[in-house]
Image: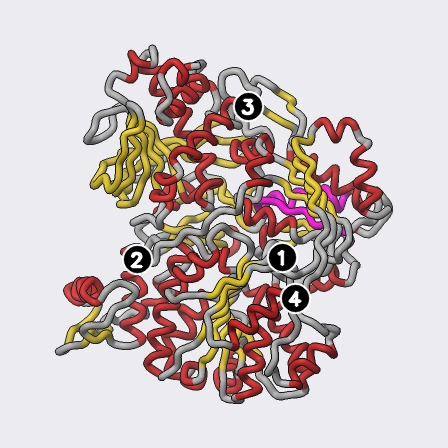
């Protein structure tokens, strides 16, 4: 049975259709061509023709022309639209013109790097010229590294290796830096928040070293569809870019279904397990021998789904090798074998985390099933793009979980289909991140008076003087030199803003390191008795040693996970912006957050039921960050005709809901933002709801929340009022145990009031 027949069968399945909230058909799109630009080396054109490429799509042709004209370029087209040619052609053209020329390719993951090197080497073989292409990452053997440095025309790496393995050792990479003409940054949409802020600083260091060696490379950036690709690319590379977004690649008809599992307990808002429902749909496809990919949000879910599907295949009398899992933690050789098995059609179903969301070549799949919303419109379209790569009909099914964010998206399909993808936000000038990279840059080359580092020269000198006062640097006449004994890049993780991480050790395996979390997150993720999940295995934390920054874990098997509850105290340092809206006020500014992890809840997988709790004994922590908050009038209790306790519960309900809908608006992870409610806010002493960033100094999310105040509250109202529960549930404001019997109604009234609606309308 082919996909079209499967779609017809689903249309006739009344039970299945009852659970659908949307069935969107995206029409097919024909190819549009722009031709090979004039002036390309005939060997290059002939090489691509050997590979069956006789013409370029419009976006490929435009991108190549812009790059060859000397412009920085940002190419924005969907998955599988051939973005690779947009940078390979100009890079190969330049190397054919000048054999000394060098290019640096930066990919967010090692797997993507390997995939791109394989593709590029195939093209070079057809050119029949000698162009060295090598990956340089943590897996590159020491014996091969010298050859990469000397013979690598194209060096393929990731941001972490560039940060710690190349830039600090620039003196042995002279050939690269003296002749660097192109820097390619793929999957730019991936670099947002803390990771993007770090990358922007790594590129500041790269450009500084290039200037020292007399080179000035062009940048070619590629991105999936997001709302602000040009702005994000220019913020990351800190230079103007030409935007290329006229996608000429063809696409087949795509059917996109939103599936909400049936409710099994209306009062508690509990639905059938999304894992079971996704498994059931995938099993039907396996029976019809339709090749598919199943995405899951966590490594644990990947393993559970893979187990279910392998069991189903065995019952069909087929080899269970037809089903494979794919996630971080697998050996590189395992992952390459799975990718090859998918391309060759030997694997029928792959269950993956978002590791396969990026552009790794896995061939043409027919169906994509998502177990839970991917977290952003951009990521969801990326995953959906994994199906239908052959111009034929494809099917995408989003199976919602009971989580509030999923329920908001599934109940509001118009938001997803009509909304442009989210914006990516970074803040390269976050003081903690900037200072970390100033230290790394000082180690690489001394700073000279009058030299800026992203920020102006005067501000740069202030930070350098501070580091000199603390004996990290030493100033001699007009220069700041590195003077500490340590190697700074080793202490800076690009994935977190917090200095220093807590490592997690498996005590059952001679203290093997199984993971790490940043220092600030350790208090809510690896406290004593917490369930820590890694590589789909569960561990219980026996001890957290904050002084030595170690958490000691041992493997366990449980049917629940743990969630820490925080007692949070906020102090407003400075309200940078504020505005009256009716009788309420929206604010954005700098906060001091003091938090203490007090208890943890045991939450049952699937149903989200609370099945127990325990105490947490850790010292309180303090962090300066950015936040957005709403203040209500002093007389809120009488205005809303609520008792003090009821007002507190309503504020908590609104805080819970706003935290869930905020990531939809500002393109961030749920863990990037926390929420708290206060009956008496510091300074104003008014009832308030706060959303604050979990990174020291903030990375720009609060300003966006402030700007999106209206749509944020409208989204919260929509999520709460569309939820079928009576008094509140985990899919909207939280359980009645948390928010009381009036929490749902009160949260809606508070949200409407904060939109400036009259009190009578707000209370309806």
Q: What residue would you read off at disc 3?
A: 723
Quarter location, residue 207: bottom left
Between the residue at mark 1 and the residue at mark 3, the CA separation in whole angstroms equals 34 Å
Looking at the image, residue 212 lies above or below residue 396: below
Between the residue at mark 1 and the residue at mark 4, the CA separation in whole angstroms equals 14 Å
Q: Assign the magenta stretch its main secondary structure.
A: helix
Query: Would you say the residues marked 1 and 4 are in contact, meaning their CB atoms lie under 8 Å apart?
Result: no
Between 63 and 262, the one nearer to me in the picture: 63
Residue at x 39% of width, y 68% of height: 203
Q: Is residue 432 left or right of residue 611?
A: left
Highlighted range, magenta:
291-311
Residue 14 rendering spot, x and y as whole percentages: 78, 27
- Find out whether residue 587 is within the magenta segment: no
Mark yes or no: residue 567 visible.
Answer: no
Q: What residue would you read off at disc 1?
A: 79
Q: Is residue 152 left or right of residue 617?
A: right
Instruction: Count neighbours of disc 4 (C-alpha within 10 A) and say few if under 14, some if 14 to 19, many if 20 or more.
Output: many
Between the residue at mark 1 and the residue at mark 2, the CA separation in whole angstroms equals 31 Å
Residue 84 rendering spot, x and y as whole percentages: 60, 68
Q: What residue would you read off at disc 4?
A: 57
SS type, badge 1:
loop
Instruction: Count neighbours of disc 2 (C-alpha within 10 A) and say few if under 14, some if 14 to 19, many if 20 or more.
Output: some
Between the residue at mark 4 and the residue at mark 2, the CA separation in whole angstroms equals 38 Å
User: Could you say which disc has been placed on residue 620 in the image?
Assistant: none
Camera-side mark, 1 or 3: 1
Q: Earlier in the sequence, mark 3 or mark 4?
A: 4
Mark yes or no: residue 164 visible.
Answer: yes
Residue at x 52% of width, y 55% of height: 509
SS type, badge 2:
loop
Q: Earlier in the sequence, mark 4 or mark 2?
A: 4
Q: What residue would you read off at disc 2?
A: 429
Looking at the image, residue 505 lies above or below residue 152: above
């Amino acid at each position: 049975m082919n996909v079209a027949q499967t779609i017809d069968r689903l249309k006739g399945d009344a039970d299945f259709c009852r659970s659908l909230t949307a069935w969107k058909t995206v029409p097919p799109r024909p190819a549009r061509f722009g031709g090979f630009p004039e002036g390309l080396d005939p060997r290059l054109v002939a090489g691509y023709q050997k590979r069956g490429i006789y013409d370029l799509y419009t976006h490929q042709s435009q991108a190549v022309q812009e790059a060859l004209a000397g412009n920085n370029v940002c190419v924005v087209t969907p998955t599988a639209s051939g973005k690779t040619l947009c940078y390979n052609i100009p890079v190969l053209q330049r190397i054919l013109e000048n054999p000394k020329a060098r290019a640096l390719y930066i990919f967010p993951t090692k797997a993507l790097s390997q995939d791109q090197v394989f593709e590029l080497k195939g093209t070079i073989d057809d050119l029949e010229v000698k162009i060295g292409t090598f990956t340089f990452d943590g897996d590159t053997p020491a014996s091969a590294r010298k050859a990469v440095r000397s013979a690598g025309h194209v060096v393929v790496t990731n941001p972490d290796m560039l940060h710690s393995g190349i830039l600090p050792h620039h003196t042995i990479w002279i050939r690269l830096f003296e002749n660097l003409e192109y820097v390619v940054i793929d999957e730019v949409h991936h670099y947002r928040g803390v990771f993007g802020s770090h990358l922007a600083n790594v590129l500041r260091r790269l450009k500084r070293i290039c200037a020292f060696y007399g080179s000035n490379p062009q940048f070619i950036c590629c991105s999936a569809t997001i709302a602000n690709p040009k702005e994000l690319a220019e913020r990351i590379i800190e230079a103007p870019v030409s935007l290329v977004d006229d996608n000429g690649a063809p696409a087949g008809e795509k059917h996109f279904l939103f599936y909400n599992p049936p409710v099994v307990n209306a009062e508690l808002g509990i639905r059938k397990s999304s894992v079971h429902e996704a498994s059931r749909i995938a099993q039907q496809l396996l029976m019809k021998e339709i090749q598919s990919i199943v995405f899951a949000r966590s490594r644990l879910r990947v393993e559970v789904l893979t187990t279910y599907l392998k069991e189903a295949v065995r019952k069909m009398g087929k080899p269970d090798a037809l089903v494979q899992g794919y996630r971080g933690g697998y050996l590189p050789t395992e992952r390459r074998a799975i990718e090859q098995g998918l391309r060759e059609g030997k694997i029928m179903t792959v269950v993956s985390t978002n590791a396969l969301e990026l552009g790794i070549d896995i061939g043409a799949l027919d169906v994509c099933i998502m177990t839970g919303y991917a977290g952003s419109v951009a990521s969801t379209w990326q995953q959906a793009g994994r199906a239908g790569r052959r111009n034929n009909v494809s099917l995408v099914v989003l199976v919602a979980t009971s989580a509030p964010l999923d329920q908001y998206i599934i109940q509001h399909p118009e938001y997803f289909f009509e909304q442009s993808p989210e914006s990516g936000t970074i803040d390269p000038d976050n003081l903690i991140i900037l200072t970390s990279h100033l230290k790394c840059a000082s180690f690489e080359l001394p700073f000279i008076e009058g030299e800026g580092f992203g920020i102006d020269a005067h501000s740069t000198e202030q930070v350098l003087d501070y580091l000199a006062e603390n004996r990290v640097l030493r100033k001699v006449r007009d220069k700041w030199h590195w003077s500490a004994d340590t190697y700074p890049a080793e202490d800076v993780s690009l994935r977190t803003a917090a200095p220093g991480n807590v490592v997690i050790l498996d005590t059952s395996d001679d203290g093997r390191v199984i993971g790490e979390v940043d220092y600030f997150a350790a208090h809510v993720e690896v406290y004593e008795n917490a369930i820590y999940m890694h590589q789909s295995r569960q561990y219980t934390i026996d001890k957290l040693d904050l002084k030595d920054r170690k958490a000691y874990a041992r493997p366990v098997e449980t049917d629940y996970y743990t969630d820490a509850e925080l007692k949070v105290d906020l102090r407003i340092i400075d309200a940078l912006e504020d505005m009256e809206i009716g009788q309420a006020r929206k604010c954005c500014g700098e906060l001091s957050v003091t938090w203490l992890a007090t208890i943890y809840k045991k939450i049952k997988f699937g149903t989200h039921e609370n099945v127990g709790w325990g105490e947490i004994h850790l010292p309180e922590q303090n962090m300066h960050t950015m936040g957005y908050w709403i203040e209500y009038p002093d007389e809120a209790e009488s205005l809303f005709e609520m008792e003090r306790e009821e007002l507190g519960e309503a504020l908590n309900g609104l805080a819970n809901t706003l935290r869930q809908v905020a990531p939809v608006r500002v393109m961030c992870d749920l863990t990037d933002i926390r929420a708290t409610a206060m009956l008496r806010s510091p300074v104003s002493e008014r009832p308030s709801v706060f959303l604050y960033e979990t990174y020291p100094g903030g990375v720009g999310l609060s300003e966006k929340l402030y700007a999106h105040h209206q749509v944020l509250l409208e989204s919260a109202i929509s999520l709460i009022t569309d939820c079928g529960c009576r008094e509140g549930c985990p899919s909207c404001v939280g359980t009645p145990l948390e928010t009381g019997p009036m929490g749902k109604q009160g949260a809606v009234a508070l949200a409407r009031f904060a939109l400036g609606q009259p009190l009578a309308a707000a209370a309806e």
